[in-house]
Amino acid sequence: MADRSCWNCGAMNAPDARWCTNCNSYLGWDTEAPASGGSGSGGATPSPPTGAGGGTEPPEPAPTPDGGGESPGPADGDGEAGPSDAAAATDDAAPAPGSPIVTVATPEVTVARDEPATVELAIENPTKVVDGYDVRILDRPDWVDLVSPEVHLMPGASDDVALSLAMRPGPMVVAQRLELSLRISSQEDARRYAVVGLVVHVPPYGPRVGVTASPAMIRLDDVGEGAFTLHFDNRSANHPQRLALAGNDPEDVVDFRFSASTVEVQAGSTADVHVEFTAPQPPPGQQRNRQLAVAATDDEGPIAATITLVQSTTAAPVDEPITVQVTPSTIRLEDAHDAEFDVLIDNRGGHSGVIVGLTGVDPEQRLSFAFIPARFVAAPGKITQARGLVRADPPPPGSQATHPFTVVASDGTTDASGQAQLEMTSSAAAIATAELHANPERLDLGHHRQGQFTVEVDNRRGVRPLNVAISGRSDDGAVRATFAPAVVVVAPGAIGYSRVSFTSPHPPAGQQGTRRFHVTASDGSQDLDASVEIAQTRPNHRPAVGRWLIVLGALLVIIGALPLPWFVSIPVPTLNPFDIASNISQASSLQAEFVEGPLRILLVALGVMMLLGIAGKEGGLTRKTAVLVVLFSAGYLVFLFVTPGLAASDLDIGLPLIWIGAAIGYAGGILVRMRD
């Protein structure tokens, strides 16, 4: 009897097996299913139905990447297949056998701003194990939220699932038709999935386009042409709106010219259309009011905007006299003293040429004028142009002045004048925009008294040359400085430099001091300031001097305790008690063997200890040792005086040297302690 093939993993089992030895799947659903490549013990296994987007489940299980069959996880306590240990299938991999069969009952839904859509799915579990399914949107737009209930199906069971598709709060969503893909994946094996399509409609909403004209009233004096702007506001609607534009007036005499005859205003945005028009002027000396209407028409009808047009004309001149116009009427000068302008002599209302002479008049009498030509013929019916030149002294730096003036054209009997004004502006003084910097801003001189730093005069924002004198002082007046150069000339847009060399006295010994040195750059009227912090430390030489004194004192003590006769004339002390008693009875032997020899050794040891006192931080060992040297040597003298019969020895000669060394060493110990 042939082996039985597992429907889930493809493993071969005994013919009478009811549970797969590999994946623990129940084999009783397909009794006597044929094994792959062999004859079965019963009928063939029926083919699972085809699901929407899931494909047809093949009779053989899909191979794993290494060539073997699927590897489901171990069965749980109820005998159902546990979660698969195989890697989850990617979105672009073909569905694995046992994928769910999904039918979309609502293939098209509408999602409104405040009305979520309900998507109804029918999900069937074709496998022989209990399975759960997750639903998600592939390539989900940011504005869509999908709410799905938990879906768990028994083997071979199906159920209807209602999904909620809502629009997220936030920016406006444009009206559109969107095709989405829903992926229904098995929770047991991610390779089992189905993908179904869904069409989502976002309906249009919002009011009609708002249309306004700017300006709402137009005034035309002696001209027949004008312009205005139409503003279209579609910010409250989520769909584009297209409008056709047309203009009219009650008299039907105004000609409208639109920059665009139709305008499409995108969803949530605005648009502008420029409109020019030509209207006939009223008779000379009269005024006429017209109502201009612009209709923006869409599918729902026209949207109107009105503009009030006020036209006026001057009365017709009768042989007008000449007029004078200065162009430009306002002449602006910046950091300059002269300017040119045009003088227009209008004789269009005259019938004959007029010989005129030009002069300039200013009430303040601060301006000078020149004209080319200064005398000429103003032709009838024309405008004759002449060139004028005005000159004045600029105002003080950083200020401005206005000088009104009049150009007079005289024909000998009558005068015509044109008004104008000269506005002069002087840039601020170079020092007003300049900056002064010290580089570096802090100097640490250590033990030195002299130093240098650089002063930068920054005139990069100025439009005038800057000429400044450099000077400096410290807070306490103790710093002496020289500047090279002492006067700096800086061109506009440049940086000037000056090298400062200074001498600063030391602070008290062993202390660190700081001084603030202020540098000033002056042009005679204003000053620029910068400062440098100078840090100094004065060394304390007393500890070093103290160490040398300790060394000298220790050497004097050792030399005084070891004169040359010490190696020759001092016998080696005896250890025999009888000899010792005999030597004690003799004063000279007692002095040589039991007093002077050990004392010299002791003084040498004390001298070495004085020398070792250099390593101490406070010099205490040196001072104590020096005191002991004096005490022992003084005791030796007392011993000589109180003991009769003792004579002077070599040690007596070295005692002054020992005392001098002890005094010097003691002084050195004091200096070592004085660190501050």
Image (cartoon, rainbow, N blue to C red):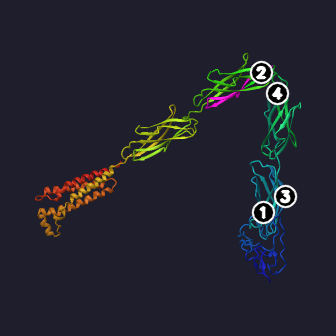
Indicate which label's residue lies in the foreground, 4 or 1.
Answer: 4
Side (left or right) of 87 relative to 591: right
The CA span between labels 2 and 4 is 33 Å
Between discs 1 and 3, the one toward the N terminus: 3
Task: Specify the segment rendered in magenta.
Answer: 319-343
Residue type at mark 1?
A: Ile
Crowding around mark 4 (Cα neighbors within 10 Å: few <14, some 14 to 19, many 20+) is many
Indicate which label's residue lies in the foreground, 4 or 3.
Answer: 4
What count of labels does the image hold? 4
Residue position for label 4? 311
Side (left or right) of 598 relative to 244: left
Picture disc at residue 184:
1
The CA span between labels 4 and 1 is 73 Å
Question: Residue 211, image x and y in percent?
Answer: 81, 38
Helix, strand or loop at label 4? It is strand
The CA span between labels 1 and 2 is 97 Å
Crowding around mark 3 (Cα neighbors within 10 Å: few <14, some 14 to 19, many 20+) is some
Helix, strand or loop at label 2? It is loop
